[in-house]
């Protein structure tokens, strides 16, 4: 419920003198905040969605019950484990709190965010991949759960540093910022999503702008950002121009050897081998990872000042999704085979009006519970 304007309840039974005094007191109380910088989104909204959109989500049905169940069993935080799902269970608790106001879930979510900070260690294996997959959800949880006071100050301070901190675990991709800059695959996609979420939370519009340009470059716009990392020979075989140095991570529209490679994330799909159709199952699995990281990035950007993000590079994410759909139609791997593959269909269908088959989403990698967030709360299909 919105607060009473200026803290004053206006009624015809209150005298003008009383009203004047009340207004002066309310105005005086508000002065310390009058010159504060504007937040990234309206105070009543969240980074991921508006308050009204959240309150329109159901509190019945399978999707809601699954999310609430996940919120009740958070597990243990570990920012060094790429496969940990504590971040998503913490996000689930924050979403339940934001939707219902049940204080126990808010307490659980805020505790989960603070617990995660203590688990980040420099030098752990695949440190940046683990951080990239998890950090965005912790940021969103802090936002939905309205982290405040000393905890908020501690989290913001840590968040500001962790974006650029060298945390090791890989010879090149050893910080979120550097990984987004240099990695033309799912590592960069996840790092970008977490960097964007963190910078939006901090109100760092300059860093969001820089990160958004890299997203645009990943999706196909070399005028915004040109990736220069050399590709493997297998990845080169998937590029439209047979170049390992002048390419876009996501292919534009083109055909090679009679194969439609439009929308292929070349460094990811080539994990299943050199050009062939249908792609190797491992290649589609990594393509789906890239779609999840980029999909979350684009959704966050579209909600926070980049309203046309879903249309970038001729609807690049829709074209990426079509690769998975074509693979399945040719007898290869498709949607919904893993928890990662079950997240983006709900969001892609909503944003593009597509009809990708959906299943109960549960947890994913960088995001989860998309059936509740973006769907009707029930599956529309069960296959791939």
Image (cartoon, helix red, strand yellow):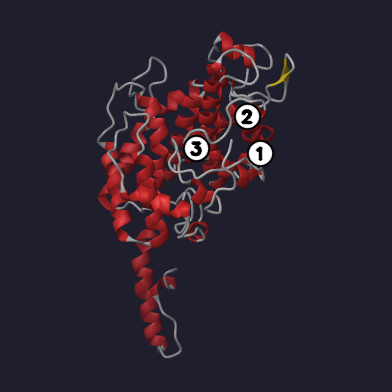
Q: CA distance from mark 1 to mark 2?
A: 25 Å
Q: Which residue is mark 2?
A: 328
The N terminus lies in which quarter of the figure?
bottom left
**Callouts 3 and 1 close, C-beta under 8 Å:** no
Q: Quadrant of residue 277?
A: top right
Q: Which residue is mark 1?
A: 311
Q: Quadrant of residue 345?
A: top right
**Callouts 2 and 3 close, C-beta under 8 Å:** no
In this view, 130 is above or below 277: below
**Callouts 1 and 2 close, C-beta under 8 Å:** no
The C terminus lies in which quarter of the figure?
top right
**Within-10-Å neighbours for mark 3: few <14, some 14–19, many 20+:** many
* Residue at (42, 54) in percent of width and height: 65
- Name the residue nearer the viewer: 181 or 314: 314
Q: Nearer the viewer, mark 1 or mark 2?
A: 2
Q: Secondary structure at mark 1?
A: helix
Q: Quadrant of residue 18?
A: bottom left
Q: Of the residues under marks 1 and 2, which one precedes in the sequence?
A: 1
**Within-10-Å neighbours for mark 1: few <14, some 14–19, many 20+:** some
In this view, 227 is above or below 135: above
* Residue at (56, 54) in percent of width and height: 376
Q: Percent from the top left, x then y, of residue 140?
A: 41, 46
The reply, left or right, for residue 78 in relation to residue 300 is left
Q: Nearer the viewer, mark 2 or mark 3?
A: 2
**Within-10-Å neighbours for mark 2: few <14, some 14–19, many 20+:** some
Q: Percent from the top left, x then y, of residue 66?
A: 42, 50
- Name the residue nearer the viewer: 86 or 272: 272
Q: CA distance from mark 2 to mark 3?
A: 36 Å
Q: Which residue is mark 3?
A: 208
The reply, left or right, for residue 242 in relation to residue 13 is right
């Amino acid at each position: 419920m919105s607060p009473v304007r200026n803290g004053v309840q206006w009624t015809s039974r209150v005298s003008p003198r009383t009203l004047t005094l009340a207004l002066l007191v309310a105005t005086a109380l508000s002065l310390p905040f009058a010159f504060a910088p504007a937040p990234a989104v309206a105070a009543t909204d969240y980074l991921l969605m508006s308050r009204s959109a959240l309150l329109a989500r159901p509190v019945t049905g399978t999707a809601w019950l699954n999310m609430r169940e996940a919120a009740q069993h958070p597990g243990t935080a570990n920012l060094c484990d790429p496969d940990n799902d504590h971040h998503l269970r913490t996000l689930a608790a924050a979403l339940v709190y934001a939707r219902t106001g049940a204080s126990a879930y808010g307490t659980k979510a805020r505790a989960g965010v603070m617990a995660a900070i203590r688990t980040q260690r420099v030098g752990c294996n695949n440190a940046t991949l683990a951080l990239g997959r998890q950090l965005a959800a912790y940021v969103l949880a802090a936002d939905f759960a309205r982290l405040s006071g000393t905890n908020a100050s501690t989290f913001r301070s840590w968040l500001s540093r962790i974006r650029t901190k060298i945390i090791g675990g890989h010879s090149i991709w050893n910080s979120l910022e550097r990984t987004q800059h240099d990695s033309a695959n799912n590592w960069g996609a996840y790092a970008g999503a977490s960097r964007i979420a963190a910078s939006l939370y901090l109100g760092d519009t300059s860093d969001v702008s820089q990160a958004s340009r890299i997203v645009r470059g990943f999706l196909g716009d070399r005028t915004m950002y040109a990736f220069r990392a050399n590709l493997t020979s297998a990845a080169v075989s998937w590029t439209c121009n047979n170049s390992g140095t002048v390419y876009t991570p996501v292919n534009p529209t083109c055909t090679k050897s009679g194969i439609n490679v439009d929308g292929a994330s070349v460094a990811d799909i080539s994990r299943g081998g050199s050009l062939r159709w249908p792609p190797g199952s491992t290649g589609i699995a990594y393509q789906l990872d890239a779609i999840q990281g980029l999909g979350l990035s684009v959704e966050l950007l579209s909600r926070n000042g980049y309203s046309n993000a879903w249309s970038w590079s001729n609807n690049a994410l829709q074209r990426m999704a079509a690769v998975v759909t074509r693979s399945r139609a040719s007898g290869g791997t498709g949607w919904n085979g893993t928890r990662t593959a079950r997240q983006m269909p709900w969001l892609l269908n909503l944003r593009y009006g597509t009809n990708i088959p959906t299943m109960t989403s549960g947890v994913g990698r960088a995001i989860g519970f998309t059936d509740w967030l973006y769907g009707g709360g029930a599956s529309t299909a069960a296959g791939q």
